[in-house]
Amino acid sequence: MYGSQTGARDEMERASSMTAGDIAERGSEPLERTLSNEPVNSLIRTVCLGAAGAAILGSLAMQMRGRKHEALFIGQWAPTLVSFALWYQIVKSQ
């Protein structure tokens, strides 16, 4: 555990000591690629999170109507959709 903390600390020191020239040398291609895909990434993330919210509300409505098995089934969609949105965001940010 101590080794991972040291590695993170070294990475933070390296990042904080970078100059504008160092950043410019890296180029802006990855940033441009990320920004060009941002509307699509944002749309997919928004749809997944909206569907997760709808699943929660739908599950609550089913629970209130006494349809417990259907409520549990629909309620289990929410963590799956949120997990997919997070996975998609992580994959697309690399």
Image (cartoon, rainbow, N blue to C red):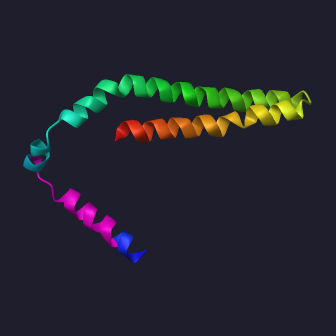
Q: What residue is rendered at 7% in x and 47% in y?
A: 21
Name the image quarter holding residue 17.
bottom left
The furthest residue to the bottom = 2
Q: Nearer the viewer, residue 19 or 88?
A: 88
Residue 1: give x, y in percent of width and height.
43, 74
Residue 68: give x, y in percent of width and height.
88, 34
Q: What residue is rendered at 19% in x and 34% in y?
A: 29
Helix, strand or loop: magenta stretch:
helix
Q: Nearer the viewer, residue 58 or 76?
A: 76
Residue 53: give x, y in percent of width and height.
65, 30
The verdict on residue 7 being magenta is yes
Q: What residue is rendered at 63% in x and 38% in y?
A: 80
What range of the chain is rendered magenta? 6-20
Name the image quarter holding residue 41.
top left
Q: Quadrant of the C terminus?
A: top left
Q: Is residue 12 left or right of residue 56?
A: left
Q: Is residue 13 left or right of residue 80?
A: left
Q: Nearer the viewer, residue 23 or 74?
A: 74
Counting the numbered discs, the total is: 0
Q: What residue is rendered at 42% in x and 41% in y?
A: 90
Q: Nearer the viewer, residue 25 or 50?
A: 25
Q: Is residue 73 left or right of residue 20?
A: right
Above or below 23: residue 42? above
